[in-house]
Every structure is written in C-alpha cells, then in structure tokens.
Image (spheres, rainbow, N blue to C red):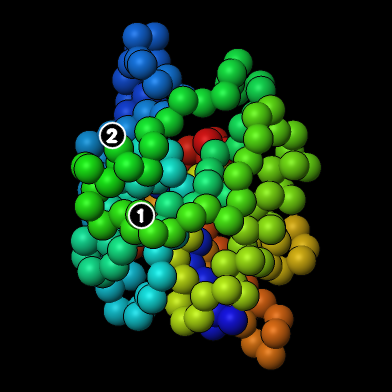
C-alpha cells in the first residue's frame, strides 16, 4: 500500500483566459493550459521536488497531461495516464462525450508518458455526481493498494475532492484551486488528511473554484 498520496488539480485553463477559443476549437472540452497555467505547473514541480514521489498518475485530458509533464520533468518520473482521474462527465457542462487525444498521440508530444500502463477505471458519459464520486473513490483506493511509496494524482477539481473523500471515507472541505496540493498519509491502514488545497507554493494563485 502507498504510504503518502498527494492530489493536485491542473493549472489555469486557456479557455478561462480566452473564452472565444471554445467556439472554434476542434476539442472544445479538452482545452490546453494557459501561459500562467504552465508557470503554475512548474512551481508545483519545484514544490514537490523534495517529496520523494515514486509514481505520478494523470487524467488523460490535455490540461492535466501538460501539468503532469511539467512536474514529471522536474521530478524525473514517467507519467501514467489514468482515465479514472478524468474530468467529471457532467451533461450540464458537456452536450456530448468529450473528444480527447489518445495516449499514443499524447506520448508523441509528451514522451514521459508510460504506454505500458493501462487505465484501471474508464468513466462513461453521461455521469451523475454520484457516479463521479464512486469512480474517483474507486480509482484512489485501487491505486493506493496497488502501488507502494509516495503517489501523486493529477486531476480536476471534482477528482481532487472525489479521490480525497474516497480514501478518507467521509466528506472533506477542499478549495480545489489550480495546482493546489492535498496530502494524505496512511496510518495503520487508515488515511489521514494532512494538507487540504494548499497553494502557498504558487506566486500567482488562481482562486476560481470551478470543478472542471
């Protein structure tokens, strides 16, 4: 079992900076990071450099992969793409299942992606809040049992909350800002919340609490 799990959200999204991008985008539900989002991801990597992380897992959406790439480059780690950490497939946000890049296409741009890793959980559109919480709880518990050491999960606002609650077994209050950090430590088979939504490592903190 893992001994420590860090959970973070991606950096600032390009469509939050330029809303018109959505109108003509080929993949409107899969925006990249904004310029400051890349800086946030780099600051996140610097913050985690001394934490001895052994496994890095990322949602397969572009903004999370970009965030994970910046962190992985600093930590010198491969990236395991895990669909179970992906965006909440909320039909009120999306009128169809989001079109995202395949692992193989992403790996051409982000060579740290481990193509030998296969997602343990695959979400299905449309997804209710209950389904999303069950899915993110399942993947958090599965990864915690399957992998040893110190894990980093890179996801979205909803999966920050869902994975933390899935491990703790009860609701928590986490302000899931961009590149925030939540830390859980395993103590005799039980998980304890040590840090919740910390952004002190960021020089430019985005305070938007949108869960996507």
Q: Is residue 194 left or right of residue 13?
A: right
Q: Depth check: 164 or 62 in front?
A: 62
Q: Earlier in the sequence, mark 2 or mark 1?
A: 2
Q: Secondary structure at mark 2?
A: loop
Residue extending furthest toward the bottom = 188
Residue at position x 25%, y 40% in the image: 36
Q: Which residue is identified by label 2?
A: 34
Q: Is residue 172 visible?
A: no
Q: Nearer the viewer, mark 2 or mark 1?
A: 1
Q: Residues within 10 Å of mark 1 (few under 14, many from 20)?
A: some
Q: Secondary structure at mark 1?
A: loop
Residue extending furthest toward the front = 116
Q: Is residue 24 left or right of residue 43?
A: right
| Picture quadrant where residue 45 is located | bottom left
Q: Position of residue 155 (x, y in %)?
A: 49, 49
On screen, residue 153 above or below 145: above
- Name the disc covering residue 115, or none: 1
Q: Position of residue 22 (x, y in %)?
A: 39, 15
- Name the disc covering residue 24, or none: none
Q: Residues within 10 Å of mark 2 (few under 14, many from 20)?
A: some
| Picture quadrant where residue 13 is located | top left
Q: Position of residue 71 (x, y in %)?
A: 29, 59
Q: Depth check: 136 or 110 in front?
A: 110
On screen, residue 3 above or below 73: below
Q: Is residue 67 visible?
A: yes
Number of numbered tags placed on the structure image: 2
Residue at position x 75%, y 58% in the image: 171
Residue extending furthest toward the top = 23
Q: Position of residue 189 (x, y in %)?
A: 70, 85
């Amino acid at each position: 079992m893992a001994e420590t799990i860090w959970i973070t959200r991606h950096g600032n999204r390009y469509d939050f900076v330029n809303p018109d991008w959505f109108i003509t985008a080929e993949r409107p539900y899969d925006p990249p990071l904004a310029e400051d989002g890349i800086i946030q991801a780099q600051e996140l990597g610097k913050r985690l450099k001394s934490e001895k992380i052994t496994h890095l897992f990322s949602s397969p959406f572009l903004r999370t992969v970009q965030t994970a790439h910046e962190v992985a480059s600093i930590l010198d780690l491969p990236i395991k793409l895990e669909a179970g950490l992906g965006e909440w497939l909320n039909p009120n946000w999306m009128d169809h299942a989001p079109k995202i890049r395949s692992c193989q296409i992403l790996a051409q741009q982000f060579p740290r992606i481990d193509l030998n890793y296969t997602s343990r959980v695959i979400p299905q559109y449309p997804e209710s809040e209950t389904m999303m919480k069950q899915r993110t709880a399942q993947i958090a518990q599965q990864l915690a049992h399957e992998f040893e050491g110190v894990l980093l999960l890179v996801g979205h606002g909803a999966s920050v909350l869902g994975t933390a609650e899935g491990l703790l077994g009860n609701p928590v209050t986490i302000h899931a800002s961009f590149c925030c950090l939540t830390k859980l430590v395993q103590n005799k088979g039980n998980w304890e919340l040590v840090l919740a939504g910390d952004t002190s490592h960021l020089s430019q903190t985005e305070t938007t609490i949108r869960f996507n």
